[in-house]
Amino acid sequence: MPHNHEWLARIKAVEREHSAMRLAADHLLEAAQADPSLIRGDLRRRDIVHAAAGLDGTYVIRLFAEFETGLRQYCETTRASHPPMRDLVNGVAAMCGVPDDRRDNVHLVRAYRNSLVHEREEEVEVVPINVARGYLCTFFSFLPPRW
Amino acid sequence: MAGQGLIQRGYAVTVSHPGEGEGPYRVSYAQRSLQNGDRQGGNGEAKDFLASVLFRDEGVSVTWEAPPVGPEVSREAFEQDARDRVSLLRDWMTRLRALVTTVEQYATELGWATRRIDKKMEDSQIGKHEAPALLLQEGAHRVLLEPVGRSAPGVEGVVDLYLMPAYDDIASLYYYDGRWNLHYIFPGTTGAATTREAPAKPLTRDTLREVLDQMKKDAA
């Protein structure tokens, strides 16, 4: 039987992975700056710069994917439909008594995730990964302990 | 050695422990290629192997509930592997349970309610296993003491303290010099960007109180 805490731990684990990759990317950039011969094959320094610059966004996408998977798993126990994410968040918030401000925080992360995935033109608020993790875990904590 | 390398690559290993008691540990080996598919061999037998490992005064005994079959890895190699995994897990659980018990006692004395939960973990040398974690609650404040890993460079155990439900990092506990050390950016600390870099204090009821009180202030 799925446990609420397991999903919180999975979301947190993504943030820890991000921390490891951030450290690795920063070290690689620093080392490549000092010794360009470290970069081999088709790789260019700018590829590493781009990867490092996009790392936070990449991990916000993964963070949100983990959150969405957990939320859909919960919903599948109560209904068979596959609603869009906005409706899913609103539906679960209504069902589990999530306060409006906590629900809106998740929509902030969702909007930022969408802007990263779909490259939308409109300006959205950037949500740092540790803030995104806090918003998503807090929302998730309103779900029942087990389902 | 070669046999244990094959086990490492070819099997997903899960170790279950007897909790606080002295019963046997169970070590199960599931062939990786069969994990998501047909788990039955051609002769109808399950492909998982299951060992029971018991610590006694006279030594460690391994018996098989479902013995290994096949020529790739000898039974002796599986038995040595099971002993090694259980030995590591036993040491880790000893350190961790002592910490959980200590924090549970301190927290209770400080007026916090506590509840033990199990956390699923995976360790490259042990395999999958469960480890104890501790939830602490006082009023609206919830804190989780959660094991992170059995080892890291220079330490024999890492456990984090989180503010829940947001899972914000509060402090870290590292086991070295034969004891658990509390790393926390106490007010006035300079030059530490992370809890790991912060100077350590021994874990005592007073240092735990200091961390919890500061956390409540920050959360207010």
Image: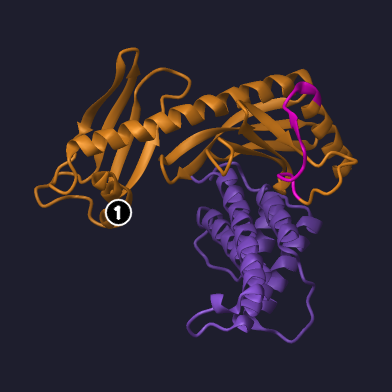
Chain colours: A purple, B orange
Q: Measured from the top left, where is residue B38 in percent x and y?
A: 22, 55
Q: Residue at x 68, y 52 (%)?
A: A137
Q: Residue furthest top?
A: B57
- Return the residue nearer the eye: A61 or B127: B127
What residue did someone put label 1 on?
B32
| B122 on left or right of A37 | left
Looking at the image, how many numbered discs can be counted on the residues? 1
Q: Residue at x 46, y 44 (%)?
A: B123
Give the chain of mark 1: B
Above or below A99: residue B172:
above
Q: Which residues make up the magenta segment?
A: B194-206
- Return the residue nearer the eye: A147 or B82: B82
Element carrying mark 1: helix
Residue A125 forms part of the magenta stretch: no
Q: Residue at x 61, y 81 (%)?
A: A45
Q: Quadrant of residue A36?
A: bottom right
Above or below B121: residue B92:
above
